Image (tube, rainbow, N blue to C red):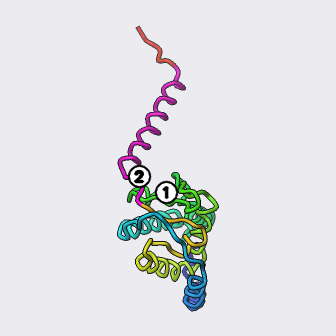
Amino acid sequence: MLQNFLTFETWQFYFYSIVFSLMIGNIILPLVNKFMRVIISPYNKAHQFKRLLASLIDIFLCLLICYPVIYGDFYFLIFGASYLLFKDAIWEGRSLGKALMGLLVISLKDGKPCNVSQSVLRNAIFIFPGINIVGFVFELMLVFKDDKGIRLGDKFARTQVVEGKEVPELVKWVEIILSHNRSMAETELPPKEVIS
């Protein structure tokens, strides 16, 4: 399977797909953004550098999940795409990257953390090969340019990234989970026999 992945024809197909996607993305994304309704938000803009780092962490995690695809395990591609789609609803409005950077995705309707459908809407652009590259660059430019840091995906989902819970809160969650698992393991273990 690895030999099929590394053939010249395969790479040529990928190259033309990406070039076509870049051309389409450069036309469609600015037009869609231009005609989308302006969102008015009472929340402050999240720090752009934190958002960039959170995105890079999430991309790295997705690539790590998808790595076995090179060896023919294509179901990992589904796992990677699923992470990209649902990542902002995993930990109450936070992906792993956002949790580590202290960011939170909230709904502009009610101020609650992003739900599953909103996460899918705001991240759907990133699962289409080729367009996801243009989408990442375009969305990154919008994050820096927009007064509230609202990108195209946020406009679709009616969400915004804001400063949220910091890393110590995440560490506390991990400690709670580990202590819960430890206590469950201790209750499930049979009592030790004493040999005299």
- Whole-percent x and y of residue 29? 57, 84
Q: Which residue is drawn at 56% across and 64% down?
A: 80
Magenta stretch: residue 6 in it? no
Q: Which of 15 and 46 is in front in this view?
A: 46
Task: Count all numbered tags in the image, as a single digit.
Answer: 2
What quarter of the picture does the N terminus occupy? bottom right
Q: Distance between the residues labelled 1 and 2?
A: 9 Å
* Element under disc 1: loop
Residue stretch rendered in magenta on the structure: 163-190
Which image quarter: residue 89? Answer: bottom right
Q: Mark 1 points at which residue?
A: 94
Q: Mark 2 points at which residue?
A: 165
In the rendered image, the vertical position of residue 22 relative to residue 104, given as above or below: below
168 above or below 53?
above
- Callout 2: helix, strand or loop? loop
Query: Could you say which disc has been placed on residue 135 in the image?
Result: none
Q: Which quadrant is home to the C terminus?
A: top left
Query: Could you tell me which residue is drawn at 52 percent across and 62 percent down?
Result: 65
Disc 2 residue type? Lys
Residue 155: percent from left, percent from top: 57, 72
108 or 128, nearer to the observer = 108
Q: Is residue 61 visible?
A: yes
Chief secondary structure of the magenta portion = helix
- Give percent across and percent down for residue 123: 57, 69
The kind of residue tagged 1 is: Arg
Query: Which mark sits nearer the N-terminus, 1 or 2?
Result: 1
